[in-house]
Amino acid sequence: MVSKSIENAQGRVEGYNFDIRKHVLEFDDVVNKQREVIYEERRRILSEPTLRDNVLRMVGSQIERLVQSFAVAEEPEDRDLAGLHGGMTAIFPLPDYMTVESWQSLTTVQIQDQLEEHGEAYYDARAQANGAALLRQFGDEGLTLANLSERGDPFNAVVYNRVLSQLGGTIDEATARLPLRQLPEETLQAVAAGVTEGAALYRDRLVMVRAVDERWVRHLTDLDALREGIGLRAFGQIQPLVAYKKEAHEMYQELLGSIESDIVHAIFKVDVVRQQQPVRRVMQTNRSDNGADQQTERRSSADIGRNDPCWCGSGKKYKHCHMRTDLAGTTSARQPVTAGKGAQPAATKRRRSKR
C-alpha cells in the first residue's frame, strides 16, 4: 500500500511538472516565431544586392501614413497641411515649390504622388552626390581597383563587388593596376556607377540593421515584462496563454512600424564617409661617402608592412622598431653610433673610474 501510494504521488508530480514545462514552451514558441521572422529579415537585408526598392517602399508607406493623418478631412479647409509639411520636413527637406499654399489647390492623392516622386528623386540625388565624393577621394589617394579588392573591410568589399558587377564580372590585370583617374572614360563611368551603388547599399544596410537590432532588443525586454504579469489574467477568466499571444502580436506589429519609421527618418540623414588615413613623411639623414649629408624622404606606416624592414635602416622589422612612434605621430630617425679610435662607451668609462 505504501509503495502504491508513493508511485501514484510520483506520477502526479511528474505529470504536473510536465504540464509546467509544456506551458513554458508554449510561451517560448510565441517569441521564437517572431525571432525567426526578424532574423530572416535581417539576413535578407545583408544579402540583397540592392535595397533601394525596399527603402522607397518604406518611404512611401510613411508618406501615406502622414497624408492620411493630416490631409484627409471631410472639408478641404479642415486639412492640416502645415502639420503635413512639418512631418515631411522631418524625413527629408522639401523644395521651395512645395509649400502649404501650393497644396491648397491639390487633392490628397496629388499631394501624396508629389511627395513620393520627390522622395525617390532625392534618394537618387543624395546617392549620386555621395558616390561622386567617394570617387574623388579614391582618386586623390591614388587608389586602384586592385587596392579595393585587397582591402578586407566591409565597405571596400561592398564597393568592389558593385564595381565588379558594373564591369561585367571581370577586370583585367592592367586595368586593375591603373589609378582610377587614369582609367578610360567608359571604364571610369562604370566604376563611378559601382561606387555609387556600393555606397548606397552599405549605407542602407547599416541603417536598416541598426534599426532592427535596437528595436528588437527593446521588444524582447517588453515581452519579458508582459510575461511576468500575464498569469494574473486567469483571475479574470482569461487564458494567460491566449492573452499573451494576442498582446505579443500587437506589440510585434508596433515593432515593425517603429523599425520602418526609424529607417525612413534616418536614411536621408546618413552619408558614407571614408576617413582618409594621413600619410606621414619622415626625413632621414644619411651620410654619404664624401661626408655630405643627404636627406631622403620616406613614407612611414602608410606603405610599410609590420614585418617589412624599418625605414631607418636598422635592419629590424618595422613592428619592432619605429611602428609605435609612427602611429603615435612622432618619428625620430635612428642615428648610427660610430666610435673613433679613442672612443669608449660611457658605461665602461664609469666602471674604470670607480676602479
Image (cartoon, rainbow, N blue to C red):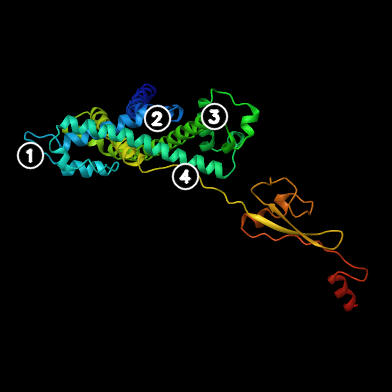
1 vs 160: above or below: above
Q: Earlier in the sequence, mark 4 or mark 1?
A: 1
C-alpha gap between disc 4 and disc 2:
19 Å
The kind of residue on which mark 2 rests is Leu
The kind of residue on which mark 1 rests is Glu
Q: Which residue is mark 4?
A: 273
Q: Secondary structure at mark 4?
A: loop
Q: Which residue is mark 2?
A: 51
Q: Which residue is mark 3?
A: 187
In which quadrant of the rendered image does the C terminus lie? bottom right
Residue 127 percent across, percent down from the top left: 41, 37
Q: Earlier in the sequence, mark 2 or mark 1?
A: 2
Q: Which residue is mark 1?
A: 77
C-alpha gap between disc 2 and disc 3:
25 Å
C-alpha gap between disc 2 and disc 1:
39 Å
In front here: 95 or 17? 95
Q: Secondary structure at mark 3?
A: helix
In which quadrant of the rendered image does the N terminus lie? top left
